[in-house]
Amino acid sequence: MQLLAMDLRMLSRELSLYLEHQVRVGFFGSGVGFSLILGFSVAYACLYLSSIAKKPQLVTGGESFSRFLQDHCPVVTETYYPTVWCWESRGQTLLRPFITSKPPVQYRNELIKTADGGQISLDWFHNDNSKSYMDASTRPTILLLPGLTGTSKESYILHMIHLSEELGYRCVVFNNRGVAGENLLTPRTYCCANTEDLETVIHHVHSLYPSAPFLAAGVSMGGMLLLNYLGKIGPKTPLKAAATFSVGWNTFACTESLEKPLNWLLFNYYLTTCLQSSVNKHRHMFVKQIDMDHVMKAKSIREFDTRFTSVMFGYRTIDDYYTDASPNRRLKSVRIPVLCLNSVDDVFSPSHAIPIETAKQNPNVALVLTSYGGHIGFLEGIWPRQSTYMDRVFKQFVQAMVEHGHELSNM
């Protein structure tokens, strides 16, 4: 590494001297414009290869899990090459929804009842044409949890289903209450601290296919909800393994980061309006317990949570809610293999809040930390339309756990 750094410094110095000479000769001299373009391209390539394209940091609480991932999920140890013209955090985050493809998926919708009289919308992809697992009773099932206001229509969810289809697996998407077009039957929505709806869904899915390997993957808030569930329930879950992507580990740190002026302008205000829109559709259900006019005037996620979410779920203060919602507190109690992919440049989840030391103390947890990738970005390749680094991590990990998960118990 030191030799590479020395070579790059020497190349940069020689390149600078060359460019200075060319500029003195005159930009409009023979071939000078081309030389400048070539020179800057070489310099950029040097910067990219030395400072941007890096192997992720793999943090595990035990040698067994680390060795298992290196053997069966090698993508977590390979160099991640972010899209060369879009590697910065905000660029990756903003671009992904627009540039990545949306593979066509035919769902079967199911509405299930909850103990409080509400209903939850599940979107199933049964993969009945699976050649690898023709017996539906033993076909692996992947439960997918979208982000804050996401549904089964999100591109990252569609990509996971497409990859699962290739593996022969069945998928079911857990849509949070009131966001997927279904009626809200009770004055209750969702939050990442309350795991009751997720527990209901997991029990329901497992009861339908008790003999099938059962895994889950959560993205952003969906990952926070999944980790909070796993931390609460411990070894009693029917899930065999889980994966999370771009989780916000500490809700206080997340909201503080998103309230910085540029992040508020690019992300916070837009997400706040999405939250307001999702609850305003069911406004008549909340007017007796919540000042909806006050909610609709919120200008940030923190203000929305203070006026709506914390009140909805009975928290005394917003700090009480944010403390309960932070999955870093429960990571030590997770009792099944969990892989967590985060980018350290994610403005939604600041690197200083990632619970590295806690992960080192739990043999069931693996953190995969990339230097770049943004929030649910992880774009790679010149034109990152069909696949992302996140997609590859998802596919390799779920396949590893389905086909080789038994090795972990023997290590």
Image (tube, rainbow, N blue to C red):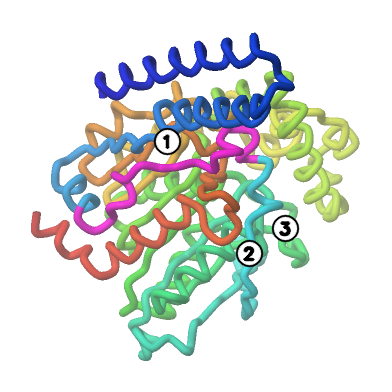
In the picture provided, is 145 more to the left or to the right than 166?
Answer: right
Task: Judge whether 294 appears above or below 225 on screen.
Answer: above
Tell me the magenta residue range.
71-93
Label annotation for residue 152: 2
Q: Which residue corresponds to the image point at 33% horizontal and 82% vertical from the top-left?
A: 138
- Where disc 1 sits, the SS reads loop
Q: In which quadrant will I find the C terminus?
A: bottom left
**Nearest the eye: 355 or 262:** 262
Label 3 belongs to which residue? Answer: 179
Q: Quadrant of residue 298?
A: top right
Q: Which residue corresponds to the image point at 65% horizontal and 24% vertical from the top-left?
A: 32
Crowd class of label 1 (few under 14; some 14 to 19; many from 20; radius 10 Å): some
Q: Which residue corresponds to the image point at 45% horizontal and 71% vertical from the top-left?
A: 164
Task: Judge whether 190 appears above or below 4 on screen.
Answer: below
The residue positioned farthest toward the left in the image shown: 410
The image shows residue 371 at horizontal and vertical percentages of: 44, 31
- Where disc 3 sits, the SS reads loop
Label annotation for residue 248: none
**Nearest the eye: 131 or 92:** 92
Q: Marks 2 and 3, how far apart in space?
A: 10 Å
Label 1 belongs to which residue? Answer: 53
**Nearest the eye: 67 or 215:** 67
